[in-house]
Every structure is written in C-alpha cells, then in structure tokens.
Amino acid sequence: MLFTALTFSLNLSAQTDSTAVKTGMDSFEVLVNGLGCPYCAFGLEKKMKELDGLKKFTIDIESGLTKFKLPAQAEYTEEFILSTVRQSGYTPQNIKIVRADGAIQTGDGQVENTFNLDEVIGEVANGMFKVSGNCASCKTRIEYGANSLEGVALAEWDKESQLLFVRYDNGRLTLESIKKAVAQVGHDADGITAPDEVYNTLPNCCHYRK
Amino acid sequence: MMLLFALTKLQAQGPPISGDKPIMLGAKAQVVKNTNEYRKTTEGWYMHNVLKYHYIINKNLLVAVHLPWATAERTAGDDPLEKTSGFGDLAFVVKPQFFRKDGKAKTFRMAGKLMQTFPTGVNLGEADISFKGYKTHVAIVAGYETLKYGILGETGYRYQSGDFSDQLVSKFGIGLPLLKPTYPVKQINLYFQYESVYNIQDNRYKLFYGQGIQLAYDQFTIDFEVQIPLIQTEGNHAHHTHDHEKRLYSLVFGGRYIF
C-alpha cells in the first residue's frame, strides 16, 4: 500500500511537471527601423499594446531600440513579435529575447537587415579584434552591440579566442566605431574600455575583469 | 499685399495640419483634425472650418472623411456675394501607400491619394472652399522623415466640375524640429512650404509660400500657419468669371488628436 501511494505521488509529480505553467516575464528587445518621428513611435507602441500582458514598454527613438516584457506563459515567439512590428508599419532589424528561465534567443535569418550588398557605399570589409567576455550572455550582448550599427552585416564572437569577427561596409563606418559600440554595451574592445557605469550593470556571470 | 509668415505644411514630427504626407503612423491609428482657414482676397474674405477624421486601416491604407463649414462674403469684383454660411462640400480620401524604405531613425515613403468631393455644400463660388460641385484630386505624396528634419512633396491633378478649371497642384516643403526629439512627444516644429497651382483651361498660375509653427505634446498637436502669394497671374479667364479675384493672405490654425 505504501509502494502504491509512493508510485501515485511520483506519477502525480510527473504530471504536474509536464503541465507546469511558465511563470514570470520574458524580456524582448527589438531594433526597429523607420521611426523617423516621435509620432511613428506612438504608432508602434499602439500596435504592440494589443499584446496581452505587455509591460514596461519603452522606445529609444534615436536608435530604434524597443524594449518590453510579456508573460512567459504566453510563449510569444520571435516570428510573432517580428510580424507584429511589421504589421504596425515599421521594419524590425534585430531581436533578442530573454526568457523568464534565463534562456536567450537572438534573431537569425528571419529578420530583415538594412545591409544590402546593392547599397554598399564603400567596400565590404572584414575585421577582427579582441573583445573581453565570459559567457553566452556576453556573446549575445557583444554581437548585439556590433549588429546595432547600420552597415554591419555580420558579427560573431568566439568565447575561446575572445575574438569578434565583423563584416561591414567601410563606406558607412570604421572598425573603430564598431569597437566603440561594443564597448558601449559593456565589453572592453581592443583597447577601448567599457564605461564602468555600464560594466557594473552586467550580470555577475559577465564580469570578466579580474 | 500684406507680408506675413506663411505656413508650412511640412512636418518632421507628424502630418501637417493643413498639408498631407504618406502614412507614417501605425495600423489602426485614428486621427481627428480640425483646420480653420481665414482667407482674405481682393474681393472679400472666406472662412473654411473643416473637421477631419482619418483612419489607418492597415500599414498601407488610410481612409478619411472631411466635413467642412464654410462662410464667405464678396463685396467687390464681378461676382458679389452677401455673407453666406453653411456646410461645405463633403470629401472622402483614400490613400494607399506603395513604397517604404526604413532606416535607423528615418524613413522614406510614397503613397497615392484620391480625394473626392461631392456637391453637398453651400455654393460660395470658390472651388477651394465650397462650390456645390464635384472635385476629384489624384496625387502622389512622398515624404522623407528623420529625427532632424522632414521633406515632403506632393504632385497631382485636380478635376473640378462646372465652370472651374482643372488644376495641376504641387507642394514642396521642409520641416525642422526645434527641440531634441523625445518620446512621448514634446516638440516645436517650424515649417516652410511652397504650393504651386496651375489652372489648365485658364492658363493661370499661382505660387504660394507658407510658414508656420507646430506645437506637439503627447497625442495633441496645435498648428498656426500663414500663407502668402508669391505669384498670381491673370490667365485668360476662359472659365469662371470669379477668376479676377486674387488672394492676399491666408491664416490657418487648427489642432489634431491621435487615438
């Protein structure tokens, strides 16, 4: 009888785990192009507020960086969020999702990019430089910082070598400006030190300075 | 001719109160506008008060309805009119957007525009205000907007029924925000615009300069505008006898609320 009761409770526990409801909030960051005026930002906010449970919605109109939170339970996908932005009349450039459980998703292949080889002003150039970081979160942040610049087509950071590879339009920007952008998000980049006030806000796991 | 500031229809921050632009707001946005123009001419004066409702159906399609109230009095010229008021000619607008190129904090867009006016209002003998006639205006509207400035252009053809000449209408303007762009909106914009009107059958040409200021706060906007004529030729008067009349200036003010 004791064995039966134990088995029953284990089964019940398994059922509870498999039907566990996600709690907490997922954090979204979307880089949006086309916000040529503050009223454009109003149009985007109005559309996004149609999403149930939307909280802490902010837009930086100069960069187009749009941040908000949505209930983890709703499990909003990257594709759905990007589609919603497009429906509002603007162009999503990049997306990063930090799920309530800590998992990080970044946009890949489904996002429109303003870097069009037909529109290269200078030449497509490759560059590589050292960027300090510790973990997967650092990788997301470093690549995000570089990709946020118009004219950067590709940014990939390798944790082992601590090197960031970039492909960019050298008629629009320089390697130095990419380094500065990466430093601005909190990672020392090839001699350019990240501001202390930004570095100190990084999660503990990302504190690479010894 | 009185020298006044003219008002501009261009805006770097939102649609001009008396002008037009491509669709910049997002889908499902609704805008209620009110524009009031006092027009002084060589023969009298006109007052044109319009209540406008704009609805953006989706990111590429806007519809609107314009309900005017018009007043006029002409004490000189060959077409005198005692002071007369009444509802003006009702107008409907459809604007499909067919091109969009978005960049970081900037955008370039183009839209077609069809504005159809119906003979539902009082006949004041002035097609711009209310003439109890049909008017069909077809145009292309283009706008380039950044956080630092905006450029707007419009070119179109206007058919007017009865004795009124068809017209070729073009507008070009620039808008400059005076304050650092913020969201929510708190902004003061300056506008500068040229409007060109050529009466085809009359061979008559008019060029106006407008300058104005717009105050924008959150979802509200208030505009003040002055427009002066730079060129007004006589033409051949092939059409409406009213064509001897020349504009001295226009004063426009209005407001807008975005839902």
Image (cartoon, rainbow, N blue to C red):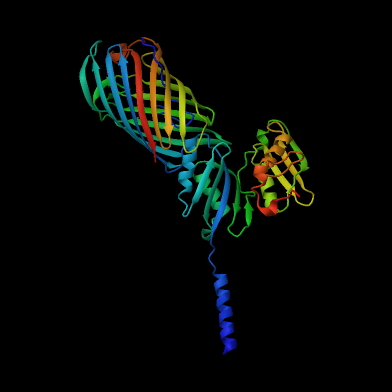
Is residue A62 found left or right of A165 in the rendered image? left
Where is residue B92 shown, x and y percent of the image? 34, 34
- Identify the residue at horizontal 54%, vertical 63% (top origin): A22
Residue B74: quadrant of the picture? top left
Is residue B170 found left or right of A36 in the rendered image? left
Q: Nearer the viewer, residue A157 or A151?
A: A157
Query: In the current view of this chain or complex, which residue is farthest to the left?
Result: B82
Is residue B200 found left or right of A128 in the rendered image? left
Q: Nearer the viewer, residue B167 or B30?
A: B30
Where is residue B36 shown, x and y percent of the image? 32, 26
Where is residue A15 shown, x and y percent of the image? 55, 74
Residue B6: quadrant of the picture? top left
Regarding residue B59, the answer to whether it shows in the image is: no
Q: Is residue A33 above or below residue B167?
A: below
Regarding residue B5, the answer to whether it shows in the image is: yes
Q: Quadrant of the N terminus of chain B?
A: top left
Q: Quadrant of the C terminus of chain B?
A: top left
Query: In the current view of this chain or complex, which residue is farthest to the right?
Result: A161
